[in-house]
Amino acid sequence: MADSDVVEPMEQDDTFEGDLNTSHFPNFRKIRTNSYHKAIQTPPKLTHERLPSVSENSEDPPSVADAILYQKVKERGITIVDDDDDEIVTLLRGKDGLRRQGAKRQSWGCLPHVQESGVLISMSSKERKRQESMFELISSESSYLRSLNVLINYFMASEELRASVTNTEFHHLFSNVEAVRRTSRQFYHSLTKRRKASSVSMHDVCDIILEHVTAGDFEPYVTYCSNESYQQRALQRLMDNNPAFLKILRQLEGGEECAGLPLHSFLLLPMQRITRLPLLVDTIFQRCDVSMPQYDVASRALRETTNLVKKCNERAKSLERTEQMIQLQHQLDFKSTRSFALISPSRFLVKQGVLTRTQDESVLGFRRVARQDVCLFLFNDVLLIAKKKSDDAYTVTDYFTKERLRSRDVINDPVGFILVVEQNQENQRTEMRFEADKPSTKSRWMAVLRHQPVPYNKISNSNLQVEVISSYRAKETDAITLKTLDVYIVLESTSDGWYYGERISDGCRGWFPSVHVKEILNSKMRERNLQRRFRMLGEVTTLI
């Protein structure tokens, strides 16, 4: 590979927050006009030693000194910025104004052979941005493949780590990641073949994406994503209960081969990459003129990659729900109530938890409030109320169909609410009062008991939008796992710091702690996020 062909993905840097007040920068318009050409005047020196290629036959993971791993890459196609200012955002950041960023970023326009060709002078701004978007997709796939190589050739190949776990645990940890890497290699090979065949600019890459997706080449991702719940539980269990495994893991994670990054960050890579792919395609699609033949191809590629992500989500959720139902079948005892067939093809668990049931009672003429902890299991069609017998066993005392339930708030009580049963087993209307341990628990139970999904046309630019700044692993069925850079539209919030939101990339909804996100203040970014949501989802949303 020639020096001019070296792909150097960008490093992670700060994100651009807030609206840019140009009055503070009198020369801003001039800077903005010339920003792209100024940015490419002094490209960094590129060498093979700085960034080794990742060819189809390359299996050795590069050292941290040689290349940027995917975890350190921040694709600009993920975070929408104003097209007019997209080059100046590397100079203008946040509220403090003009300051240089230390992170390096290699772009298509910085490649020496591109500059020497003179094409940047004659090429339109929109076409140049399309070239940059296609280049970014290829360079980020390169970094992603490097990280996969570290996962397989460093962590998975460790004989000490392999000897510390059982065959089943090893399979749960690494699943079919080798098949995922083969898919990435084939995909990257097709992309680089197209790039090398192009003298300066590429005519398209969305046709390659469309070909690979429609041919079923990305099916290994569906399998890998479906095993995510097994994988995360296996890793946590081994870290908690297997000292030998934990010791070896800590030694591996301290090595320079993985740049000091933890194993779980590598295990999450396929899920992160497949969910980001539609966003990268969407960025290319936005920069195609309607009159271009590439427009229709990009539109189809966007639709197919979005459907691929939905398939991954649905398969993962389906297997997780099936496992939950089988486990609950063994944990729940219906001897204290009428017979009930728990297992049903269409039934799944929505939320479970412990609440305190309160009742007024009279003892020797004195009134008092009786309290009893009960366990609630809410499914998509029925609510079970049970008493705990042991750590993993419950006795069901009553159940109600969900369509006969509604919740009512208790005024001036931050943790109390009333569950109204329109018709119980004796065909009578009854009310039950519950208390939660904190306000967010109350809000989440009331929301899941009462509300219908927020209609698509009710979501607007007035809704709070947030970007994930730190990952979060969902521990409850009504929560959602957060991955960095994902954007959410907030639909509800609680007084103690929880949000209920929708991920714009695939429409999945759930609760998450607000400490893991930051508000998006830039009005243009907010509007573009809504436009992206419409392009990727239409009127389809998915409830978690």
Image (tube, rainbow, N blue to C red):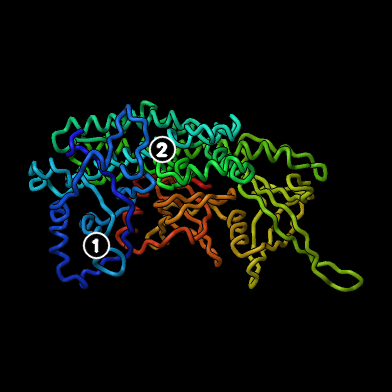
Q: Check disc 2: other Cα within 10 Å, few if <14, some if 14-19, many if 20+.
A: many
Do tag 1 and tag 2 residues touch (Cβ < 8 Å)? Answer: no
Q: Secondary structure at mark 2?
A: helix
Picture residue at 11% right of the left edge, 45% below the top = 115
Could you say which is closer to the camera, residue 520 or residue 364? 520
Seen in the picture, residue 209 relative to 265 is either above or below; the reply is above
Q: Earlier in the sequence, mark 1 or mark 2?
A: 1
Which amino acid is tagged 1?
A: Arg
The amino acid at mark 2 is Val
> What residue is shown at x 30% (from left), y 48% (from top)?
77
The location of residue 223, given as percent across then percent down, is 49, 32
Is 453 or 524 nearer to us in this picture? Answer: 524
Task: Indicate the quadrant where residue 186 lies.
Answer: top left
Q: Which numbered marker is on residue 150?
A: 2
Residue occupied by mark 1:
100
Callout count? 2
The correct choice, above or below, for 493 with respect to 107 in the image is: below
**Whole-percent x, y for residue 504 in the image:** 41, 50
Please identify the quarter of the rendering in which residue 282 is found: top left
Q: Nearer the viewer, mark 1 or mark 2?
A: 2
